[in-house]
Image: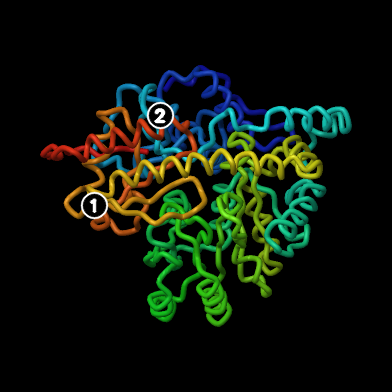
Amino acid sequence: MKLDYDLLLDKNIATPLYVQLYEKFKTLIEENQLENEKLPSIRSLAKKLEVNNVTIINAYKLLEQEGYVYSLKGSGTYIKKSPIVDDLPYIEEGDMELMVNGILPLSKDSINFASVSPTADLFPIEEFKHALVEVLDRDKGQAFLYPEITGYEPLRESISKFLMENYNTKVDKSQILITSGGQQGLDIISKTLIQQGDYIFVENPTYSGAIAAFKSRGARIIGIPMEEDGINIDLLKTYIKRYSPKFIYIMTNYQSPTTYSYSDEKKKEILSLAKENDFFIIEDDFLTDLSFTAETKLPLKSIDKLDQVIFIKSFSKIFMPGVRIGFITLPNRLFKEIVKAKHTTDISSSGFLQRAFDLYLRKGYWKSHIEKVKKVYSQKYKIMTKELNKLNQYGITYLEPKGGLSLWLKLPKDVDALELYNECTENNLSIVPGKIFFTDDSIYSNYIRLSFGAINNEQIIDGIKILENIFSKPFKDSENKYLPFI
């Protein structure tokens, strides 16, 4: 890559050098001004800019956290292309890591069963615009100052109230840290808790982005099988004695990708085990609000009396992904370490957006928005389950989660999900093969995840028809050496 662009850093201003470099690359990427996909090597760029290697490393990490780039071990850092790609239906085996990092080729005509992100027509544009304008009128230039590292205090107060009103969960505002989405929360926790070689427990299968964050800090990942009411408790007890984990990472409601929800009994038992064996529980939540029944689901954090649970919440999948608002609850004994990790990540999340989201919550817009999206997603869910029942004759089974944004399908034993993925891609249908969610490399190849967040009702019907047509005829013999990426 040529370095003829303006990457010069000003050492005489207060903005850290790595933040300056991040902002320059961000602008270049957004304006499509970079000729090559690969960023300069850390060493060469540090030498050219006359800065420490750590400056480049931190800038690249921040770009990766914000979704602008991805890194490949031993290869370098690359610009993350738009998820819509017309000419890349497959990639080579050695690049399976791309799929785990969320890069999915998707033709413009493809029906997208892969994404859980909402469609733009569901964004609460008018309400949030009112909040943005009111904040500008009220706070003027103050709106663009750095907030506290832990976040804008009134927003932390609003979130404390939100937790009590919605989840019966008591957390003081002083124990809330605002983050730029859920993924940043995972990165901060990883920086704080993980030392090289520590054992970390995760559900198996689980969110691949969490595994990537933990591995980046040198953790040893132990997967514990998911059952329909939560992880296998007997195996958890055995592994606790054998490995002494630093923490366990779980999603208690509409788990990703299985969509399963934990029983109250398992929640209590996991909490008891954490107390007895002195490990933390990282509870990741982004879909508890999307229940399609009268049943009220509560997070594990709601019964945590001893600060064993670090609760991570993202609003992205239900609100607006681009706003990047989330938070972590901070145990008192980890407060200083977590705040320090946040500061070294990005100083603070956008103060303007925090002020606007605070006003959005205080005016009650969130409640009306949730009711609206629940109706929309509930209808999509009903259509998808109705259409999927037509595939029962082909041996496809699934558990109805009655909430969330996805369905987790088990395929017949003789059907490999990667082969099915390739068949679907050829027919302009995008699905996610279950293999990428498992910690084991050689098993569980006959699951797929179908999501209905990014499609309309008609596309659901058309997409299931494509699946039905594929299953109604024998699968192609495939010796394809390629794997897809998502």
Name, please, the residue furthest toward the right. Answer: 138
| Residue for point 76% across, 35% down | 352
Position above or below: 260 against 304: above
Q: Using the numbered discs, state the Cα–Cα distance from disc 2 to disc 1 in whole angstroms.
A: 44 Å
Q: For the C terminus, which image quadrant?
A: top left
> What is the image's colouring?
rainbow
For the residue pair 333 and 82, the one nearer the viewer reads as: 82
Q: Quickly name the residue at label 1.
A: 395
Give 390 or 337, whichever is nearer the viewer: 390
Task: Give SS at disc 1.
Answer: loop
Q: Residues within 10 Å of mark 2 (few under 14, many from 20)?
A: some
Q: Residue 203's spot in the image, x, y percent? A: 42, 62
- Residue 119, by quadrant, is top right
Q: Is residue 339 left or right of 92 when viewed as pictured?
A: right
Quadrant of res 423: top left
Nearest the viewer among 213 and 203 is 203
Q: Amino acid at mark 1?
A: Gly
Name the side, left or right, on which 388 lies relative to 69.
left
On screen, residue 409 above or below 17: below
The residue under label 2 is 38
- Mark 2 or mark 1, earlier in chain: 2
User: What x and y, as percent, mark residue 416?
Assistant: 21, 48
Marks counted in the figure total: 2
- Would residue 176 be seen by someone viewing this image from the given angle? yes
Residue visible at 30% across and 22% down in the picture: 87
